[in-house]
Image (cartoon, helix red, strand yellow):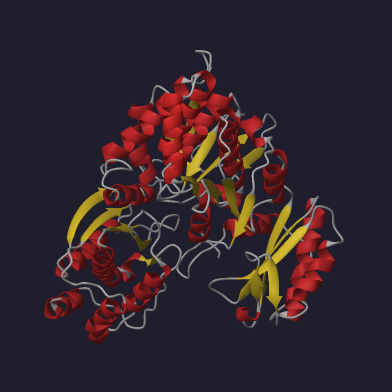
Amino acid sequence: MDLGAITKYSALHAKPNGLILQYGTAGFRTKAEHLDHVMFRMGLLAVLRSKQTKSTIGVMVTASHNPEEDNGVKLVDPLGEMLAPSWEEHATYLANAEEQDMQRVLIDISEKEAVNLQQDAFVVIGRDTRPSSEKLSQSVIDGVTVLGGQFHDYGLLTTPQLHYMVYCRNTGGRYGKATIEGYYQKLSKAFVELTKQASCSGDEYRSLKVDCANGIGALKLREMEHYFSQGLSVQLFNDGSKGKLNHLCGADFVKSHQKPPQGMEIKSNERCCSFDGDADRIVYYYHDADGHFHLIDGDKIATLISSFLKELLVEIGESLNIGVVQTAYANGSSTRYLEEVMKVPVYCTKTGVKHLHHKAQEFDIGVYFEANGHGTALFSTAVEMKIKQSAEQLEDKKRKAAKMLENIIDLFNQAAGDAISDMLVIEAILALKGLTVQQWDALYTDLPNRQLKVQVADRRVISTTNAERQAVTPPGLQEAINDLVKKYKLSRAFVRPSGTEDVVRVYAEADSQESADHLAHEVSLAVFQLAGGIGERPQPGYKAAETTHNISNAFGPGTANEHTVP
């Protein structure tokens, strides 16, 4: 390790005084002008991680659904998954080190992780369309090269595309070809094969309106559309030609405000979807004949996908172990529908994509989605081989179902939630089942819910268990919640501390909006009284503006430098 060169280069990417950042679920995120030193240092860290794992590591420059003036960075581990938790700690340690401590910190990490510094390192880099991204990715490259790492700069990519490239490179091409054309061709071939089997009459040519959040998704979808155009026509909105990234558009905006994005005219019953800024989340929506807006979120996407997979398995005669993974924020109706109607087991994890992904890996087939539209399906290697065999050996209807399943497996990006891949999966399933968007929406009706937050002196007084659904401390709080829940039909409620601020988040659902509102308020009062509430006592009554604000808190995890409420 050439410590002299590192010190010299590091001075060119100096850390602003007093800036402390935390590597969270989404990596680092903050105002772009504060990130130059972080990018350089993440280039260094990626080289160490690559040497330690003897694998290609990815570095993605993006701030996803945050405003255009922000940026961020996250590292991608060998199988396209998120960075290991122990290395998240190293990332925070390195990003916050003072200039004079840089050498010591790098040596510390190398020794702690037994990194062989003679080992070759290879890093792949991608970036989104933010004005700051090109310069910041150059800072990453500076970090990689000063430590002697080799790199490939993919330039503009969606976040899930970079995850895909890392996965392909570390499986020797078994998962796919690590080029953008390889990605387009693998997904499109699977999609076209699937939609060929849909029994649509000729006049039912399928079209979809796509809001691309003025982000990278527009660029990549435009490059890709001619590959799959015989199965689907996409009409792109908020394609980055005039609007600002994520401003009044994108999956996050649509979900939190419960209305269509700006710049998209919707006729009744037209199928529409929105990506987020880096195209790793997707939500669907439509207007009914009366002009009412209907959102189809991650829960309903998971239900459509897992039901279809279960039907194919039944058709083939395979009894594989399939599971759906949700968080406590999943609507109770979705859980009930999956367990009672579809007979698919549902498991709950703590909030945060990495927890869902990890749990989904335990099944032959694991499907996970957060309500915000981030998710995918994972298939074990044994299952993939078994399905391939079935597609070759079985007869007639069984063979057809096995072939469908084989193509569905290829259509998923198993490295990460991917809006483009998920969109094609959904469109294929709707076509194959002959479902309209309204019929999909009607699978079940969401229970009314309410989310609130209560300010407390110290959020650490609340600790939880059972995937955040039960409070362990302070004493008496869970008992109080249990008693309140008994008063309402089809109700449940839970509380969890925020990851970033001294507030406690309250979630309640019940058979009517009025009951959900009352329950949420009563639970808030219990938190205020038993967990050291500060400021004004929670008041009953909700204005319309609060409704949209409160819905936005459903998104689950965030980091200190994210605009999603954690």
Image coordinates for residue 105, horizontal then vertical, percent: 28, 82
Image coordinates for residue 24, horizontal then vertical, percent: 44, 68
Image coordinates for residue 355, horizontal then vertical, percent: 52, 60
- Left or right placement of residue 512 versus residue 95 in this view: right
- Left or right placement of residue 141 versus residue 417 in this view: left
Name the residue rendered at 30%, 54% in the picture: 127
Q: Locate the N terminus and report the quarter of the image it occupies.
A: bottom left
Say above or below: 130 vs 102. Answer: above
Say above or below: 248 vs 47. Answer: above
- Left or right placement of residue 533 versus residue 179 in this view: right
Q: Is residue 471 visible?
A: yes
Q: Is residue 552 visible?
A: no
Rendered image quadrant of residue 320: top right
Name the residue rendered at 61%, 37% in the picture: 307
Say above or below: 349 vs 161. Answer: below
Say above or below: 443 vs 520. Answer: above
Residue at the far right: name it.
Answer: 487
200 and 134: which one is in front? 200
Q: Locate the C terminus and report the quarter of the image it occupies.
A: bottom right
Name the residue rendered at 50%, 50% in the picture: 374
Image coordinates for residue 397, horizontal then vertical, percent: 54, 20
